[in-house]
Image: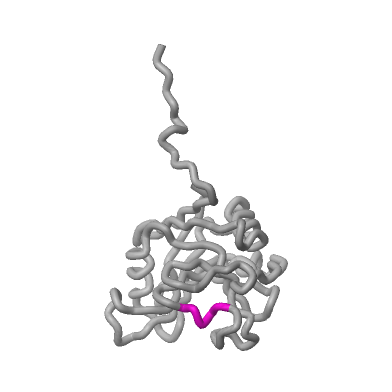
Amino acid sequence: MLLVCLSCSQPHYKDPHVLITTTFGELELELFPGKAPKTVAAFLSFIDSGYYDNSSFYRVLKYDDQPPELNTGIIQGGIWQTNPAMKIQLAGIPHESTRLSGLSHTDGTVSLARTDTGTATSEFFICIGDQSPLDAGRRGTADSLGMAAFGKVVKGMPVARKIQSRPSHGDHFDEKIIISIKRM
């Protein structure tokens, strides 16, 4: 009798992993529910609800005069451009600052975008290079409470850099980059 273990080929992780699929390649994220439980729970609920199916990366911060391999900044994505009606219906997620989580906005960190404390919902960004001014107590946000980091890119930072190097004007890509996000 031959027994086949189909689930044996699937990696088992301590923390949840998700996969962002783009036309430029894939990004694998590890999420940290032990450090940012409310943020991770909300992000996973949006994934499970299908909100990120056919969503996009639409915003970029970068230096126009730097080569891609040396550039720093962020790429931001979510449902703001692809499903704005849904975005405005979502309740804000309680802010889990980096002071509480112990995380920092270093290269590959995934964090929620927000305007005011408790207003973050479906929009997230990936740090490219050191973005630690976005940590609590720093000057990267008007209220010094920082952004809510909740994960890290564990595979695919070259893809993030390739996306960041796409043509843009101001802080928006000339063409949004369609993405989908699924649990692994």
Query: Percent x, y for residue 23?
Result: 37, 60
Range of the magenta residues?
131-135
Tell me if I can see residue 46 in this picture. Answer: no
Closer to the camera in the image, 81 or 48: 48
Query: Percent x, y for residue 121?
Result: 64, 68
Quarter of the figure that contains the N terminus:
top left
> Going 54% across and 51% down the picture, which residue do you hit?
15
Query: Percent x, y for residue 62?
Result: 39, 81
Horizontal side of 94 relative to 46 (left or right) equals right
Closer to the camera in the image, 159 or 133: 133
> Going 54% across and 71% down the picture, which residue do you hit?
81
Q: Quadrant of residue 111?
A: bottom right
Horizontal side of 21 relative to 31 (left or right) equals left
Query: Percent x, y for residue 17?
Result: 50, 52
Q: Main secondary structure of the magenta part?
A: helix
> Going 60% across and 66% down the picture, which residue do you hit?
122
Residue farthest to the top, as pictured: 1
**Quick check: is 134 in the magenta stretch?**
yes
Q: Say how many tags the image has.
A: 0
Horizontal side of 25 relative to 61 (left or right) equals left
Q: Is residue 38 above or below residue 172?
A: above
Q: Quadrant of residue 83?
A: bottom right
**Quick check: is 139 in the magenta stretch?**
no
Closer to the camera in the image, 55 or 39: 39
> Going 67% across and 71% down the picture, which residue do you hit?
95
